[in-house]
Amino acid sequence: MSGAGRPAPPPPPPSAVAVREDWRRALHAASAALGPAALALPEHTATLALGGIAFLAAALEVLRHRAAPARRLIDTVAHTLFRPTEQRGLSGPTALAWGYFAAWAIFGPRHAAAAIVVGGLADPAAALIGRRYGRGPGKSLAGSAACAGAGAAALAAWGFALPIAVAGGLVAAVAERAPWRGADNILVPLAVGGTLALLGA
């Protein structure tokens, strides 16, 4: 009997890995809002807020690794945030929180806020494009190009001159390719903030 007229079978449900990565990318991109939010606050208040987020993330990280009841509770509430490789060592979200805080503590507010925006948007762009168009399991040229483009676009939208925006995007792409797990979450905001400061933007 022909299958004509039958409803198409429902698409297969997305894998747990895909859901987790989509969720991580969405939260990573949403964290870019911390840049303009910090800039809108008094500098001292913003420092306390970003520092509080970083130290809270570090405290939860210690509890997750050292106390089994806390680990079970954290994994129940935020299980979609952690990759299997993050069951030990520093997780990506904690590294990102410290990258933002370090950029804010080191650079001027405008440069730091812009660096946070790039840190929030460039890495998810690299992951999204890299997984779709890249080859192999590692970081790809397609992902790096997306990282540079997203970083440059964010800086241009922030009001930086185009050459400076392009330089910041390229630096972000280089920092994003750091081979150590989670290092890019710290290095991208620091590299972009340092570039903007050095160029006197």
Image (cartoon, helix red, strand yellow):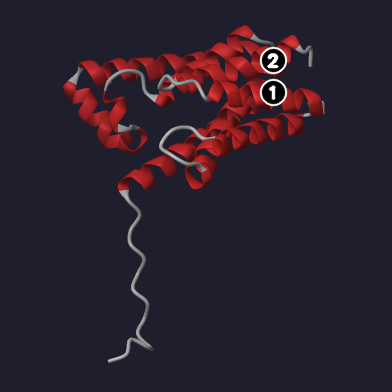
Query: Which mark is first along the chain, 2 or 1?
Result: 1
At 29% across and 15% down in the image, what residue appears? Answer: 62
Residue wearing tag 1 = 168
Q: Is residue 122 rendered to the left or right of residue 136? A: right
Amino acid type assigned to the residue bearing label 1 in the image:
Gly
- In the picture, the quarter occupied by the C terminus is top right
Q: Position of residue 173 (x, y in %)?
A: 60, 27
Numbered circles on residues, count? 2
Label 2 packing within 10 angstroms: few (<14), some (14-19), many (20+): many
Above or below, 63 against 15 in this view is above
Check contact, mark 1 vs mark 2: CB within 8 A. yes
At 18% across and 24% down in the image, what residue appears? Answer: 69
Alpha carbon of mark 1 to alpha carbon of mark 2: how far? 6 Å
Q: Position of residue 155 (x, y in %)?
A: 72, 29
Amino acid type assigned to the residue bearing label 2 in the image:
Thr
The single residue placed furthest to the left in the displayed view is 68
Residue 59, quarter of the rendered image: top left
Above or below, 58 against 156 in this view is above
Residue wearing tag 2 = 195
